[in-house]
Amino acid sequence: MAYAEKRGKYWRVKFKLPNGKYGSASEDDFGNRFTTEREAEQYGQALEADARRGRRVVNPRSGKLTFRAFATDWLDASDLADLSDQTYRSRVRAQLIPEWGDYELRDITLMSYRAWKKRLARAHETNYVNSLTALLRLILEDAVDDKLIDSNPVPFGRKAKRGRYVPPANLGEDEYVHADPHQILCASENARCVRDSIGYTMIMTIAYAQLRMGEVAGLLKDRVWLSDDPYGSAIRVDYQGHYLTGKGWTLHPPKYGSYRTLPLPPFLAELLRSCMDLYPDSPYMFPSITGRPLRVDDQFYGEFWNPIIAGRPAEPRRKGTRGRPALCPVPGIEGMVPHGGRHSGKVWMDEDGHPRVAVEERMGHRDRSVEGTYSHVTPEMRRRIAVSLQARYERSLGVAQTLWATPGQPDLPNIAQPA
DNA sequence: CGGATTTTACGTGACCTATG
DNA sequence: CATAGGTCACGTAAAATCCG
């Protein structure tokens, strides 16, 4: 237990450290000395409480603040979207604390940082390594601002490149896998085998409304505005849905606040209409197979997405399983992920020559370029996008019929005749 | 290019389901 | 009707996207 001692005019406190030894302090975090016994005791008790929670155990004014303590405070003080907060905490807990937790801030050096980065690079993807080093830099940058350390040991990328020639990035092939309308049709037919018309419609919605996956999961039925006017229907993107540790399934604003209204090609509006009553108890357009909100997790990919893209062999009905039919792989889009469906729709709109501002608006992007600033999107532009998407769908059906009619066509995907 | 934010994936344990 | 083995829910780690 903490106890205070009189030392000259002021008081000093002794407090117990986690290792059983006693530490002492004669001033608080702001350099104020203790004029009463009670002040000193309270400070010591606070330190002990912190220590019990694995927090700061040394006087920060001495510069002897551990990374663990500072990072914990940093996280508590940060103001981020829930999922971002969760992500940062995860990175700090999984990677930064195990490496740097016991370091005092000023002992984190450029050399030790470089060694760590090198080790990370061997074990992880560049994207992940970059996000970890960036986070360490970010946290330490605030430690500099707080005058806890003199300078940030983690260099900025662009500073590190000063005075050196860095060859430009490879301008080669676009490697992001995306699909043409016929491939999307094939994938949708596969999806129909797995999830009936709701699966078919989901794939079509991703590609033809260019929704992000979280927006698909969070699409409410009452945000699908259906009209008898062929081009009068629209999807209103007001939410995205995702899973949060502790809170479970929750609705949030779409990424970067990209609220928007998407006029629909008539075929998509009809598909959505036909799905409205499939899960009458769910407010969501695309609930999971159990009728709950769709969590886009490994089961979604393993049971639904990957099979409809890559195909799968038939599973016989046997112990513990219902059995299921084979799916044909969709040629040419190996490894495509749902986000690739969104990219696909973007590519089609670009190919069809729509104004950049109109395409960016539909994607939910902000166009801050000169063109974006001076151009404006009109209802007619939005309508033309829906018209050209409808044309693409109809053409893909024509291609499917041609393929279907060709005898001896090898590896034909599960293309059903349009009803 | 930095960094906030989203998407994709792994591991685990409780809970089902068709079979012998 | 016990049980082998699949299914589902959840917490979390890892990887990628894309705004400003």
Image (tube, coloured by chain):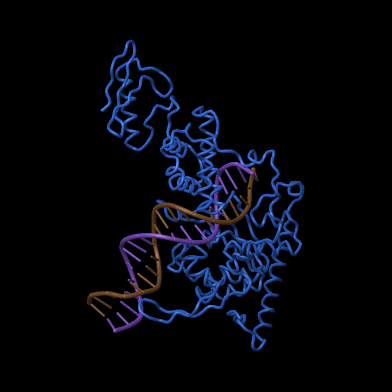
Chain colours: A blue, B purple, C brown
Query: Closer to the camera, B18 or A221?
Result: B18
Q: How many marks?
A: 0
> Vertically, is A6 above or below A302?
above
Whole-percent x and y of residue A62?
A: 43, 25
Query: Closer to the camera, A180 or A115?
Result: A115
Residue A419 visible in this rendered orientation of the protein: no
Q: Tell which residue pokes out farthest to the top in this image.
A: A9
Residue A290 visible in this rendered orientation of the protein: yes
Q: Residue at x 45, y 40 (%)?
A: A100
Q: Residue at x 43, y 27 (%)?
A: A60
Left or right of C16 in this view: A101: left
The answer to which quarter of the image holds residue A31 is top left
The answer to which quarter of the image holds residue A269 is bottom right
Query: Closer to the camera, A232 or A293?
Result: A293
The answer to which quarter of the image holds residue A222 is bottom right
Whole-percent x and y of residue A234?
A: 63, 62
> Vertically, is A14 above or below A114?
above
Whole-percent x and y of residue A79?
A: 50, 40
Q: Residue at x 55, y 60 (%)?
A: A213
Which image quadrant: the N terminus of chain A? Answer: top left
Whole-percent x and y of residue A165?
A: 71, 44
> Vertically, is A91 above or below C6?
above
Left or right of A181 in this view: A146: left
Which image quadrant: the C terminus of chain A? Answer: bottom right
